[in-house]
Image (cartoon, helix red, strand yellow):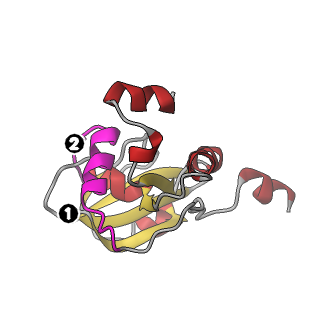
């Protein structure tokens, strides 16, 4: 599939300047697959890899200049939450109990998933950019001098289901 995308754009692997990947927070398996795929593809290329916050990408989907929360249900009574404004992190991504999150002052927020709690007084922001468009916007703002690696690790903000059930 990746080879097909390159061919469609008339590119070769050597012409790829860098990779960017959403490292989380998110599903344990999905994050692992994304990071492992980039690591495998980049094993011989040795191109820079930039780790992007999945919540920051969600925040960009609002295409808004105002400060807003990007939130996603983390299940089991928890929420992934981060606060962003124009691509800048105002509050780092965290996994917190819904009750604790709802102690924040109501504010604008965006989510691309189903939110299981009523957010009385909060203002939902519409999704204006696709996930792909928001990722491209995030990549446009990467400073090539920022720290990068040749592979990245997923951002796990809570233990996996197996760790919760069997440890």
* Point 42% across, 37% down: residue: 12
Q: Position of residue 151 (x, y in %)?
A: 57, 60
Q: Residues within 10 Å of mark 2 (few under 14, many from 20)?
A: some
Instruction: Tell me where the magenta segment starts and ends, as one range.
Output: 119-145
Compared across the picture, whether 122 is left or right of 114 comes to left
Asked whether the residues under the numbered discs 2 and 1 touch, taking CB atoms below 8 Å apart as contact, a structural biologist would say: no
Image height check: is 92 above or below 57? Answer: below
Q: Nearer the viewer, residue 45 or 59?
A: 45
Q: Nearer the viewer, residue 116 or 56?
A: 56
Q: Is residue 156 left or right of residue 88?
A: right
Quadrant location, the C terminus: bottom right
Q: Residue at x 34, y 74 (%)?
A: 145
Q: Is residue 33 magenta?
A: no
On screen, residue 29 versus residue 149, left or right, reads right
Q: How many marks?
A: 2
Q: Is residue 154 above or below residue 34?
A: below
| Distance CA(mark 2)–CA(mark 1) | 15 Å
Residue wearing tag 1:
86
Q: Element under label 1? A: loop
Q: Position of residue 125 (x, y in %)?
A: 22, 48
Tag in front: 2 or 1: 1
- Position above or below: 12 against 144: above
Q: Quadrant of residue 141?
A: bottom left
Q: Residues within 10 Å of mark 1 (few under 14, many from 20)?
A: some
Q: Which residue is mark 2?
A: 126
Which numbered dot is residue 117? none
Q: Residue at x 49, y 33 (%)?
A: 2
């Amino acid at each position: 599939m990746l080879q097909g995308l390159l061919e469609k754009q008339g590119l070769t692997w050597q012409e790829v300047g860098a990779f960017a990947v959403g490292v989380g927070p998110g599903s344990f398996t999905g994050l692992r697959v994304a990071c492992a795929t980039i690591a495998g593809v980049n094993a011989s290329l040795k191109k820079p890899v930039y780790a992007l916050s999945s919540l920051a990408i969600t925040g960009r989907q609002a295409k808004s200049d105002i400060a807003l929360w990007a939130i996603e249900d983390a299940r089991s009574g928890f929420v992934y939450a981060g606060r962003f404004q124009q691509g800048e992190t105002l509050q780092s991504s965290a996994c917190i109990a819904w009750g604790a999150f709802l102690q924040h002052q109501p504010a604008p927020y965006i989510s691309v998933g189903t939110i299981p709690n009523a957010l009385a007084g909060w203002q939902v922001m519409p999704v204006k950019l696709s996930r792909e468009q928001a990722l491209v916007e995030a990549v446009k703002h990467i400073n090539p001098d920022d720290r990068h690696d040749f592979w990245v690790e997923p951002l796990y903000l809570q233990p996996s289901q197996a760790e919760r059930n069997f440890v």
